[in-house]
Amino acid sequence: MQLIADENFPLISIRLLRQAGYDITSVTEDSPGIEDTEVLARAVNEQRIILTFDRDDGELIYRFRLPAPKGVIYLRFRPHSPEEPASLFIIYFQG
């Protein structure tokens, strides 16, 4: 599973996912400040699934009909810690 973490995804969680063996790139590390349309285009070009807390990706895909990536995992909760998103992702996807 190839992932791209949006700028709002905690760096600690990105590192934990890498340690767990996931192929994950980070907007924060690679290209901070880019527009959502650029994140979406990058995800499409690199065939990655977007990890985000931002619902704008859905609007770009469905309302503005921009090309869709392999997937968007939209996390709809406020994490108690920066590690929580990675922990929940690992539990959910590795069982």
Image: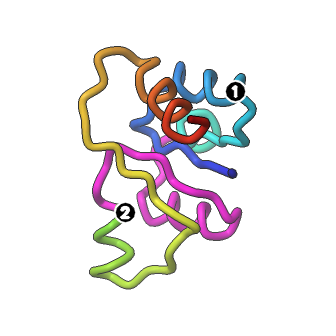
Which residue position holds label 1?
Answer: 20
Where's residue 72, x and y in %? Answer: 46, 59
Front residue (pair 78, 25): 78
Q: Residues within 10 Å of mark 1 (few under 14, many from 20)?
A: few
Q: Quadrant of the C terminus?
A: top right
Front residue (pair 51, 31): 51
SS category of the residue bearing label 1:
loop
Kindly give the residue lying farthest to the top in the view shown. 81
Residue depicted at 61% across the width and 36% down the height: 94
Kindly give the residue lying farthest to the bottom in the view shown. 65
Q: Residues within 10 Å of mark 2 (few under 14, many from 20)?
A: many
- Asked if the residue at tag 1 contacts the one at tag 2, i.e. Cβ–Cβ closer than 8 Å, the answer is no
What segment carries the magenta color? 32-56
| Kind of residue sitting beneath label 2 | Asp
Q: Closer to the N terminus: mark 2 or mark 1?
A: 1
Instruction: Tell me the mark number nearer the camera, choosing from 2 and 1.
Output: 1
Left or right: 89 as drawn, with respect to 23:
left
Kindly give the residue lying farthest to the front in the view shown. 95
Residue depicted at 43% across the width and 57% down the height: 35
SS category of the residue bearing label 2:
helix
Q: In this figure, what is the number of numbered marks?
A: 2
Residue depicted at 46% across the width and 18% down the height: 83
Residue depicted at 38% across the width and 84% down the height: 65
Where's residue 34, x and y in %? Answer: 48, 51
Which residue position holds label 2?
Answer: 57
